[in-house]
Structure formats: structure tokens, C-alpha cells
């Protein structure tokens, strides 16, 4: 792990990082159980990417705008979306903060938290994030806009158009590629020819960083530096965080057909949560008693959120057209 003291973090910060990483993991694991029990329709996992997400989140500040992608459960939880919000969305309930039960799970949206609405076509969040960065610059705000995506999305046209525009106009924008080495079933070797996707930054005239996404401290460092550059008028940054996808692409996928057995068997050794926990234990920052307390606390939080979401009402037919263009216009003729 990177030297946490050199980047201004202390032991309490590291304990907080782990707590958020663990809460994201526990929520994700519960979603899988609910899906396998037939209670929710779909899961797309954050497992293996919590370190990158919480590391970058720790460098963000109130007023920053985020355009996350579908795996960013740990990130949006840190930004303020509650476990109940997550469960209401998973069940498609009326009080789902993301869309009132209209969007599929993992399509995050929260105006109060500065989280832009997620679209299903991958890559749109880059343009949305760049547009938000332009508005922040025009309004002379001391904030940044950021987006996240998987490495597969880096080959979409929206990615190139957005970063080119950000580079030309020196926008306060940060683009984070959470590179988990698979675009559904396509390995990174068949996705791009470059050694590092962060090298593409040169072509856009922006700063590029390649970082170990399993290390939340290193992720915090590069994100904080990128944010400082943006606020100093030095333009945008492209960060490539190398992560590990611990699960199949989604609950509708079986990765045994394309992922070598040896690789799948070795995934636990690449688990960022396990690695960070081991580091904290070795440094005597946490102990088994503290871990047991956190385990129980998060179990109770997730249980309560699940119970409340299961009991919550579904949207009524009369609410179908709420928040869609002019409310009720189709029903009213």
C-alpha cells in the first residue's frame, strides 16, 4: 500500500475507508442473495472495485458533480446514497430515489448529491460529465466534475469526443477508467492495443495517471492531485485504475465459458477488501474485535434496509408517467 502519511491521511481515515469498502461489499453480497432467491431481477457487481471507488470518493468534496457507471455502488454509497436507497432501487419500489422504480438497478441518480442520471448506453456519462464541468467553469465554481467507466467503454465514440472537448477547453474534469480487464466476456487483450489506456491522455492534451486500483490510498493520491490541478486551471485528467472483477459480468452472465478456471480460482487472492484488511491488521491500525464490531454493524444496516424495501409499495399504474416529459400528458389525452 502507498504511504498514507505522505498524502495527509491518518489511521482514522484508513479505518473509515475500510468501513465504506466493507459496507459496499455487504450491500453487494446481499443483492446477489436476493437475486438468487428470485426477489430482485438483476445485479451488476462492484466486488473487486471498492478500493478504487472509495479512494477516489475520499478526494471529492461537497459541490463536486459525479457521473458514475453501473458498478459504482461503493462510490455512490459514500457520496450519500443510503443502503435503503439501494434496496428500494433493486426491488423497483415507488420510493426509489434513482427513478421511482422506472430504471433497472444500478442506474444511479440523485440531484441533491450531484449524481447525474445513469443511462443504459455505455459512454454517455462522459459527455454528461464534461458538460457539467463546462458549467462549473462558466459559473466560476471551485468544484470539479468526474465520471467513471469500464475499460470497454473507452472504445466508444462518446469517450473520445468528451475527452477531446475537455482537453481543448481545459475543463475541471476527471475521467476514471475502472479497468477490470473484461468488457463483459472480451478480455483486455482484444479491446485495445495500447499498453496503458492512460497513455491516451496525451492525444487529448490532458494529464494521464495509471494506478493500482486495489490500493485505496494510491487512488486517493492521484484523485486528489487531479482535483487540485483542475481547480488550479491546469485542465482535465484521465485516470486508469487497475481493478479485478470478482464476479461474472452480471447476474445474467456465466463467466465460466470465457474466464479460465485457474483465473477464477485465484480471484480471492486479488480481492481489494481482503488486501486492505490485511494491511490494516499488519499495521495494528485495526484488530479482530474492531472487525467483528463493523461486521455486526453492517449486517444490521443491510438487514434493516432489506426489510424496509421489501415492505415498501410498488409504483401504482397511475404513476407510470410521473417524471416523464409532461407529467400525465399521455393519460390525460
Image (cartoon, rainbow, N blue to C red):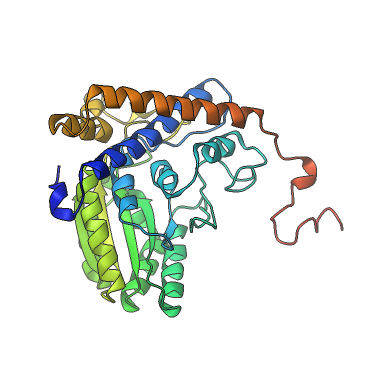
Looking at the image, which is closer to me, 18 or 270? 18
Instruction: Please give the name of the residue rendered at 29% of the width and 64% of the height, measured from the top-left corner.
Output: 227
Instruction: Please give the name of the residue rendered at 19% of the width and 49% of the height, measured from the top-left corner.
Output: 218
List x then y, in percent, for residue 112. 53, 57
Instruction: Please give the name of the residue rendered at 33% of the width and 60% of the height, measured from the top-left corner.
Output: 175
Q: Visible in this render: residue 291? A: yes
- Asked if 132 appears above or below 41 in the picture, the reply is below
- Asked if 273 appears above or below 233 in the picture, the reply is above
Horizontal side of residue 252 vs 242, given as left or right: right
List x then y, in percent, for residue 203. 24, 70
Horizontal side of residue 282 vs 302, given as left or right: left
List x then y, in percent, for residue 145. 40, 64
The picture quadrant where one finds residue 148 is: bottom left
Looking at the image, which is closer to me, 307 or 292? 292
The picture quadrant where one finds residue 282 is: top left
Q: Quadrant of the N terminus?
A: top left
Looking at the image, which is closer to me, 152 or 223? 223
Q: Identify the residue at the far right of this view.
A: 333
Q: Quadrant of the C terminus?
A: bottom right
The picture quadrant where one finds residue 214 is: top left
- Asked if 62 appears above or below 44 in the picture, the reply is below
- Asked if 270 appears above or below 326 in the picture, the reply is above
Instruction: Please give the name of the residue rendered at 59% of the width and 47% of the height, measured from the top-left corner.
Output: 97
Amino acid at each position: 500500500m502507498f504511504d498514507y502519511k505522505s498524502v495527509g491521511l491518518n489511521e482514522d481515515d484508513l479505518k473509515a475507508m475500510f468501513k465504506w469498502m466493507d459496507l459496499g461489499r455487504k450491500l453487494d453480497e446481499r443483492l446477489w442473495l436476493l437475486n438468487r432467491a428470485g426477489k430482485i431481477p438483476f445485479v451488476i457487481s462492484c466486488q473487486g472495485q471498492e478500493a478504487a471507488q472509495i479512494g477516489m470518493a475520499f478526494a471529492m468534496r461537497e459541490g463536486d458533480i459525479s457521473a458514475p457507471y453501473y458498478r459504482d455502488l461503493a462510490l455512490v454509497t459514500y457520496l450519500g446514497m443510503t443502503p435503503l436507497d439501494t434496496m428500494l432501487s433493486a426491488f423497483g419500489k415507488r420510493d426509489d430515489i434513482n427513478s421511482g422504480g422506472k430504471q433497472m438497478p444500478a442506474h444511479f441518480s440523485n440531484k441533491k448529491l450531484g449524481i447525474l442520471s445513469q443511462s443504459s448506453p455505455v459512454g454517455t456519462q462522459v459527455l454528461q460529465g464534461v458538460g457539467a464541468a463546462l458549467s462549473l467553469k462558466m459559473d466560476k465554481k471551485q468544484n470539479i466534475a468526474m465520471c467513471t467507466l469500464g475499460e470497454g467503454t473507452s472504445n466508444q465514440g462518446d469517450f473520445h469526443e468528451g475527452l477531446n472537448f475537455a482537453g481543448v477547453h481545459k475543463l475541471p474534469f476527471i475521467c476514471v477508467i475502472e479497468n477490470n480487464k473484461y468488457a463483459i466476456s472480451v478480455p483486455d487483450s482484444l479491446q485495445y492495443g495500447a499498453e496503458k489506456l492512460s497513455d491516451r491522455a496525451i492525444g487529448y492534451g490532458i494529464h494521464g495517471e495509471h494506478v493500482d486500483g486495489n490500493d485505496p490510498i494510491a487512488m486517493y493520491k492521484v484523485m486528489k492531485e487531479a482535483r487540485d490541478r483542475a481547480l488550479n486551471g491546469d485542465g482535465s485528467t484521465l485516470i486508469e485504475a487497475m481493478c479485478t472483477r470478482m464476479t461474472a459480468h452480471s447476474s445474467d452472465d456465466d463467466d465460466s465459458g470465457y474466464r479460465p478456471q485457474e483465473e477464477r480460482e485465484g480471484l480471492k487472492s486479488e480481492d481489494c477488501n481482503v488486501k486492505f484488511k490485511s494491511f490494516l491488521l499488519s499495521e495494528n491500525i485495526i484488530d479482530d474485535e474492531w472487525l467483528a464490531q463493523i461486521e455486526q454493524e453492517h449486517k444490521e444496516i443491510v438487514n434493516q434496509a432489506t426489510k424496509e424495501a421489501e415492505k415498501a409499495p410498488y409504483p401504482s399504474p397511475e404513476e407510470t408517467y410521473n417524471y416523464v416529459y409532461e407529467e400525465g400528458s399521455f393519460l390525460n389525452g
